[in-house]
Amino acid sequence: MEIKEVFKKEKDLIEKEIEVKGWIRKHRKQKEIGFIDLSDGTTIKQIQIVYDKKLKDFDEIQKIHFGSSIKVKGILKKERDIELHAKEIILIGDCSEDYPIQPKKHSREFLREQAYLRPRTTLFQAVFRVRSVASMAIHDYFQKEGYVYLHAPLFTASDCEGAGEMFRVTTLDLEKIKETGKIDYEDEFFGKKVGLSVSSQFEGETFAQAFSKVYTFGPSFRADKSHTPYHVAEFWHVEPEVAFCDLDGIMDIGEDVLKYVIKYVLKHAKDEMKFLDERVEKGLIKKLKKVLKEPFKRVTYKECIDILKQSKIDFEFTPEYGSDISKEHEKYLTEYFDCPTYITMWPKELKSFYMKEKEDGTVYGADLELPGIGEVYGMSQREDSYELLLERMKKLDMKIEDYEWYLKLRKYGSCERSGFGIGFDRLLMYLTGIESIKDVIPYPRSHRSCDY
Amino acid sequence: MEIKEVFKKEKDLIEKEIEVKGWIRKHRKQKEIGFIDLSDGTTIKQIQIVYDKKLKDFDEIQKIHFGSSIKVKGILKKERDIELHAKEIILIGDCSEDYPIQPKKHSREFLREQAYLRPRTTLFQAVFRVRSVASMAIHDYFQKEGYVYLHAPLFTASDCEGAGEMFRVTTLDLEKIKETGKIDYEDEFFGKKVGLSVSSQFEGETFAQAFSKVYTFGPSFRADKSHTPYHVAEFWHVEPEVAFCDLDGIMDIGEDVLKYVIKYVLKHAKDEMKFLDERVEKGLIKKLKKVLKEPFKRVTYKECIDILKQSKIDFEFTPEYGSDISKEHEKYLTEYFDCPTYITMWPKELKSFYMKEKEDGTVYGADLELPGIGEVYGMSQREDSYELLLERMKKLDMKIEDYEWYLKLRKYGSCERSGFGIGFDRLLMYLTGIESIKDVIPYPRSHRSCDY
């Protein structure tokens, strides 16, 4: 029986015989009695096993090492908490003495090095369960709203938005190139240069012009060398794209999604969120519940620059109209507004070429800033005019032929359309209170780091 | 209003004024009247728009090209089907004359070349909606059963099971290697050789030993040059992994998943499945409903070879004990059994090193064969003994140091555990009746083909 079920049905199970399996998280031994905290990971809670001298192999049981897997048959009792009074304890898999995890607090850095074992700690049981539940919340939201889930390709022959550096994929033998001094791209698996997708927006747009509402949820890759708590080379990306929708409409959807995910996680990962609230970020649940109550702020870029200027703070980067909003500015602004805030209408020079332009040189784009995290979504209304988009691309000296099909979407039944990209891992940092993106990702990949 | 909503609430909407937006799928023009079939992709159904001379811009409207996006205001009427009697039709985005899709039947090969436009056809509206709904079914099944959804990494520094050829990822400048004749792997983004994951099983096992029940659902990559209707280089992979579970247990789960997905798709993509049943595979729904009714067959590899031998058929590959079961054999066997069938207990030489071995030299592995498709899942009980696994790897001359952490799982609280991998795209072929895997994937990538 799963330990989760034991807690769920405890009323019916008291005084009954049950069997559980799991891993030992704590083993306290006394002369006549022993206590084991057992986890099977189906719940963050551990069940306490009590055994005593009556068991014929008492001495053997006392030798069972922390981390081992065991099977326990016993009678469920309830004192203050539930306890399983063992009638039989059988060792399934021993845990060797060199087990790196000990029944004590380890640093997050140490646990990161033990990425294949850290899900066995209570902290990472909470984090990765929340990750799973939040993923389901994303799917649940979009599916109930009638969106089509698009599995966008990760191999791409086009440069998409050129954001960040792209990883190259090859089946060529690099050693052979070195020796012979020759490359034949025709020998490549795909017969041409191919890289890994940094965004599925363009594919999303093609599907939005067929299904009206689509979303992707899959990995994206950026060969970004930044060593910050917010950057990894492989991240999960949610990219909804909606036809017949303007910037205001997509901001409504973005707000709706976030609130839905928060509600869902608070409901479906209750114990985990309580643990994170107690151990990682005091006030986490209160912070999230506050978000549910109020509409997100929508402030223009220009207003933000004005607020930053009026702050009189000696920023490292002086806030100026035309310059980007840096991490320190984001921090000030989110504290100033004290709630999720959309920064809208950016100067076009700061944003991607595909955003729809207003006459004043700003674009219909918005970044969602979350207190403590900074930017989590980027969204925009896409340029829907073939002529205007082509003109903009020419001005930016882009290779038009690489974007032929993207442009053509504007010739074949174009329409107002908007979309956004959620950095799912950053969203998780916000939801869990975890300070490093590497601690919300099972096996994080970043500059000079690809272990396991 | 979404067209889906119009059909759903038609009773309440008759004789009321509504507004819809969408793309013209058919435009029939008569002298005094015009008919437009309008789709917005929220449903596979199109709504018929009727307009007449009473509209002041009647002549302009008649010129609107197939494929254009329009906005229509009108009164909903019901004759045999519902019709929207237009009071106003506004062109949103014109469709240029060179639009490759025409209101006629195109070949699948032609549409594959127009991958960015084909979701606008009814066939691909059905296929990609089913893909989305079936994905949700997978998540729904595992989440309701308490599994943790694991986002496994796609960048990998280990060779995993060495299945298929691995794509290499690089940030090195190949041209520079050619010119200088030098490679410094230290210059690689990750500081070492990295490839793209062919399977997430190993990461799944690490999480199963923490959460008991986990699944992955994400892309996998294989540089496989096979040109068949079943092979692509990038595919979506569902990989559940369950602790305290043997081969029989995992076969139960595999059967349960497939039945759940079928039920879910028949319920949530009813119109689409009806369309596919009528236009793609006659009897599709009947075939799927039959699967729901009976338990899957479980037959040993040895029994299968015997059946093949007794068949007296002149196979290209003569069935022999010790040889693999080829595509033609699969075809014969699935027709012979006429239901989803697990082929179990294979000779170890034919299967991966990590499968648990029986004394007779067979392994606890099973392939699920579906009639008309062949193998869709591969599953096995994993070797849980450190010593036996190590011994097997040494015999196979594997590089032990590359599998250090995988091996160590067997030293740190090992247990019976089993898992399987579903080729999601092949499963979709089965669910939709579509004959080529390239037609169930939005943007398929395969040998010498990476368009869009």
Image (spheres, coloured by chain):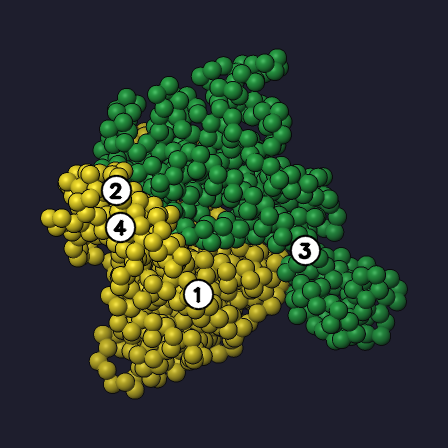
Chain colours: A yellow, B green
Q: Which residue is mark 3?
A: B44
Q: Which residue is mark 1?
A: A264
Q: Earlier in the sequence, mark 1 or mark 2?
A: 2
**Which residue is at a point 74% across and 76% down the rendered structure image?**
B17
Q: Residues within 10 Å of mark 4 (few under 14, many from 20)?
A: many
**Label 4 lies in what chain?**
A
Q: Position of residue B374 (x, y in %)?
A: 56, 31
SS at circle 4:
strand
Quick check: A352 left or right of B179? right
Q: Amino acid at mark 3?
A: Ile
**Which residue is at a point 34% across and 74% down the rendered structure image?**
A287
Q: Position of residue B108 (x, y in %)?
A: 65, 41
Picture quadrant where residue A280 is located: bottom left
Picture quadrant where residue B60 is located: bottom right
| Cα distance in 3D space between marks 3 and 2 | 58 Å
**Which residue is at a point 62% across and 57% down the rendered structure image?**
A210
Badge nearest the viewer, 1 or 4: 4
Q: Position of residue A355 (x, y in %)?
A: 49, 67
Q: Residues within 10 Å of mark 1 (few under 14, many from 20)?
A: some
